Structures are given as C-alpha cells and as structure tokens.
Amino acid sequence: MKSFNAKPWLLPQPVIIIGTYDENNVPNAMNAAWAGQWNINEIMISMGNHKTTRNLNACGDFTVAFASKETMVASDYVGIVSQKNNPNKIQKSGLTTEKAPNVNAPVFTDYPMTLECRIKEKLNESETGYYIIAEVVNILCDEKYLAEDGKPDVEKMDLITFDPVHMGYIKLGERVGQAFDEGKNLK
C-alpha cells in the first residue's frame, strides 16, 4: 500500500448548500463539504470566516440542501463566489428561492432535498470560524424524488460527493445492498 500524509480525505464528503438570509433579508448560499450527522436529529458543519458565517451570527436559522448532478454548476458557483463581493450572486446562479416554512432561511427549490436547521451550539469559535452543531427542525423533499413508500428516494436524486483527492465531483451510484441485512449472510 502507498502511504500519504494526513489529508482531509474522509469519504464520501457531501456537497451541501447552506442557505441563509443576510441583514437585508436577501438570500445567500454557500457550498460546504465538511459536514456530517452529529446525533439522531443534529448535524455538524465546519465553518470558516464567510458572509454566511456572519449571517449565521445574526440569525441561527439556515437550510442545508444536497447538491445533485443537475445542480452541480450552480452549487460550484455559490462556493467560489462570495455574496460580499457579488450582491446578485443568487440571481446569477439561477437558483430559485422561497422562504422555509419552519426556520428564517431560504429554501433553494432546485435541490431535491433540504434540511431546515437551527444552531444549537458553536464550538471553537474564533476569528477564522467555528463548528456548528445544529438541530434539524424539518426535512423538505421535492415530491418527484419520493419512493413508492412516500419517503425520499436517494437513488433518484443523483446526489454528488466532493472528491478532495482530485478536487472534483462524483455522482453517487446505485444501491448495492440492504443495511443491517447483508452481514447476516456471515452468521
């Protein structure tokens, strides 16, 4: 096996779009990859010092949308362009917004699934950013991405993951097994 120094290569890394309102109630979006499940109804996100971070300091409500192959270009754009320098960033991205029903944040309706979130705690807060622990208040899913059982169908969403090794996006694939079942073959 070839050896590498320590790198941020935990895989897969979700491509999430954080939605906030600024001080003028203008929607903002930021692409982030360093996030994960914290608890049964909580998530964690590593935040640097961004316009979105300032928005979160003013209001702890936000949304998290999952980027897909279809939204890849807009998702990448909102990650490389700051609303601080480009006030019409959302308009240029082509994303469509509406107010979230349960939190004071925008929902970008172009994404297949969105979490409505509220900050519970900030960890290691400094001038360079902080870690967010947030409660998931509600989950919204476009009905075209629902399975026959009425729940979100992840395979239909064409979600993408960030490849930190080669700095790219990879579309997640198909179901290959059933969790908590496949291992029973070895009992």
Image (cartoon, helix red, strand yellow):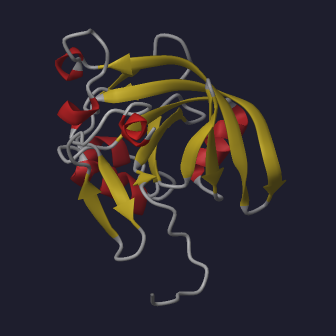
- In the image, what residue occupies the spot 47% across and 26% down? 115
**Is residue 186 visible from the viewing direction of this image?**
yes
Q: Which quarter of the figure is the N terminus placed in?
A: bottom left
> In terms of depth relative to the viewer, which is nearer, 147 or 18?
147
**Is residue 92 visible from the viewing direction of this image?**
no
Q: Is 85 above or below relative to 181?
A: below
Is 99 on the left-hand or right-hand side of 20?
A: left
Give the image quarter of residue 23: top right
**Tag count:** 0
Q: Position of residue 72 (x, y in %)?
A: 24, 51
Q: Is 149 above or below relative to 79?
A: above
Is 114 on the left-hand or right-hand side of 57?
A: left
Q: Is 145 above or below relative to 126?
A: above
> In terms of depth relative to the viewer, which is nearer, 123 or 183?
183
| Residue at the extreme front of the image, as rendered | 187
Give the image quarter of residue 178: top left
Q: Position of residue 25 (x, y in %)?
A: 52, 28
Is 66 on the left-hand or right-hand side of 51?
A: left
Is 23 on the left-hand or right-hand side of 187?
A: right
Q: Position of residue 166 (x, y in %)?
A: 34, 77
- In the image, what residue occupies the spot 32% across and 57% down? 76
- In the image, what residue occupies the spot 63% across and 53% down? 47
